[in-house]
Amino acid sequence: MFSDLTLARRLERAEGLANVESVASRARLAPERGAASIEVAGAWAMFDGIDSPLTQTFGLGMFAPARPDDLAVIEAFYAERCAPVFHEVCPLADPRVLPLLHERGYRPLEFTSILYRPLHPHPAGERAEDPSGVAGAAGQRGVAVRLVEPAEYDLWARTAAEGWSEFPELAGFMKDVGQVTVHRTHTYCFLATLDGEPIATGALSIHDGVGLLAGASTVPSGRRRGAQLALLDARLRFAADRGCDLAMMGASPGSASQRNAERHGFRIAYTRLKWARNT
């Protein structure tokens, strides 16, 4: 499998649709926020609030040529909501995107490594939800992983937020994001427990055979117990069981998350660049 336009389109579509569904989840949970999305020339423009990381576009120039009129429609969408304009741009997009963004007053803002790995059906008799072998290999027994039920949605969101407890200013925001995630369509949320106590979370979104891994968080007292390794194994097996042939995730270039992903069979497909419009 090569890192080409065909692969990039699958990965960008999967992440774009997951974010569109996050915005739809927000609209159901908090209609007063005005969350909305539109599709313009194959790109998704999303609004989830002025300060939300979901307020941006995905797929610009990936599925149709980038034209000034399309950018004008997207910019008007954000202007109506008094929101800044951000574009996540894949390096395999239409080459006319970059000069067009430059002409319209955008500047590069940040990089994201997009990683992927092929998935194959696991041997008959193995359970997708049973990561015990991985946990044991990590030297930590007693870690169990399960899909959360609707009655556990709040527990999942609280646990995910607790993983960021070193940053009190983010606590409310992360709990809010967690609530959006658990109510998102085509998304499966997993909880890792140690001796029955929740210690870590992970999420999996599935679109057109691509499993997008996100939502990784571990409470401080549960770290270095093999929970994230167990969650990774469970989600990859779960995705393969449901016909996915690809898994993907995003990470900051050179980060510990990227290194851990590469240790477990992921490779970099490309490095995406976010653009911001000068104000």
Image (spheres, rainbow, N blue to C red):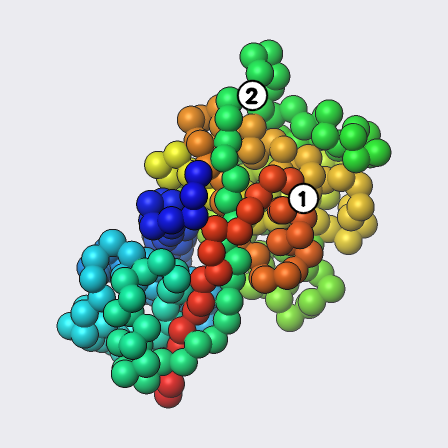
Within 10 Å of disc 2 (Cα), the crowding (few <14, some 14-19, many 20+) is: some
User: Vertically, is 133 above or below 227?
Assistant: above
Foreground mark, 2 or 1?
1
Relative to the observer, which residue lies in front, 101 or 5?
5
Q: CA distance from mark 2 to mark 1?
A: 19 Å
- Which residue occupies 67% across, 48% down? 260
- Residue with the mark numbered 1: 263
SS for callout 1: helix
Relative to the observer, which residue lies in front, 6 or 174?
6
- Which residue occupies 57% across, 43% down? 266
Q: How many circles with numbers are drawn on the protein? A: 2
- Which residue occupies 72% across, 26% down? 132
- Residue with the mark numbered 2: 122
Task: Identify the disc placed on residue 177.
Answer: none
SS for callout 2: loop
User: Vertically, is 99 above or below 176?
Assistant: below
User: Vertically, is 66 above or below 25?
Assistant: below
* Image quadrant assignment for residue 49: bottom left
Whether residue 204 appears in this view of the structure is: no
Q: Amino acid at mark 1?
A: Arg
- What residue occupies the far bottom of the structure in this picture? 279
Within 10 Å of disc 1 (Cα), the crowding (few <14, some 14-19, many 20+) is: few
Residue 88 percent location from the top left of the image: 40, 64
